[in-house]
Amino acid sequence: MKSFSANTKEAYYAFKLNVLFHYIKIFLVVVFIIFEELAWKRLGQPAYEAIKSLKVMDKFKDWIADIDHRYMLLAIFLVPFMLMEVSSIFAGKALFSGAIVTGIGLYTIKLLLTAPVVIIFNSGKKILVSFWVVKYGYGTILNLKRSNTFRSVKKYTVKITESFETFKSDYLNTTDGDFSESIKKMYSDIKKV
């Protein structure tokens, strides 16, 4: 039986740990991109734009920008942020447990809370990033988006999306409205059987 020195074992375990962290990072990037592509671009961003365009939001932005007390601004930011994150966790739990309507409802709450959170963050970013936790979280997201892993997974996600759109237009020969109508018709036909 071959014997390894302590340094060799440590190097082996360090290598395995780095490989594990690499795969965890890829998994997190994939989850982030799926969220960004499916949930945010199709649902969240239109809701955010609609809420942001309300006249009351201009006054809200100005009110946030005028807050000088950093702890008050942090509290105003954290309340909807925590509600948003908790609703996201419960939405995921509900969806995975099969409670689709509850999951979608909770996820809708998350999407609606995203607008005020983004507005508060953008309006008070200078003060909010003075807190190390906010700065660390914001920096982590920026570093993730700048990483080679993110770029390569994003590139493949775009290729898959383009391939699906090509497949849909070439083989299903329908527009978006017709495709969803054909799916609904197929569903109702199957349900009748």
Image: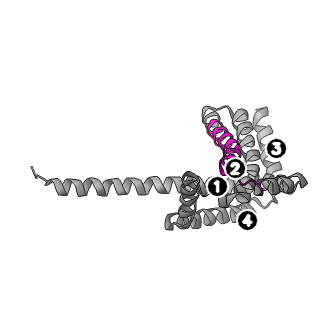
Find numbered disc 2 in the image and state the secondary structure of the residue it sits on: helix
Q: Sequence order check: which comes first, mark 1 or mark 2?
A: 2
Q: Which residue is mark 1?
A: 128
Number of residues whose C-alpha sits closer than 10 Å to that of mark 4, classed few (under 14), some (14–19) or many (20 or more): few
Find numbered disc 1 in the image and state the secondary structure of the residue it sits on: helix
* Residue mark closest to the camera, 1 vs 3: 1
- The residue range painted magenta reads 66-92
* Residue mark closest to the camera, 1 vs 4: 1
Q: Are marks 1 and 2 in contact (CB under 8 Å)?
A: yes
- The residue lying at 69 percent from left, 51 percent from top is 69
Give the CA distance from mark 3 to mark 2: 50 Å
Q: Sequence order check: which comes first, mark 2 or mark 4?
A: 2
- The residue lying at 18 percent from left, 57 percent from top is 7
Give the CA distance from mark 2 to mark 4: 52 Å
Number of residues whose C-alpha sits closer than 10 Å to that of mark 3, classed few (under 14), some (14–19) or many (20 or more): few
Q: Quarter-wise, where is residue 132 in the image?
A: bottom right
Q: Is residue 58 inside the magenta stretch? A: no
Give the CA distance from mark 1 to mark 2: 7 Å
Q: Which residue is mark 2?
A: 73
Find numbered disc 4 in the image and state the secondary structure of the residue it sits on: helix
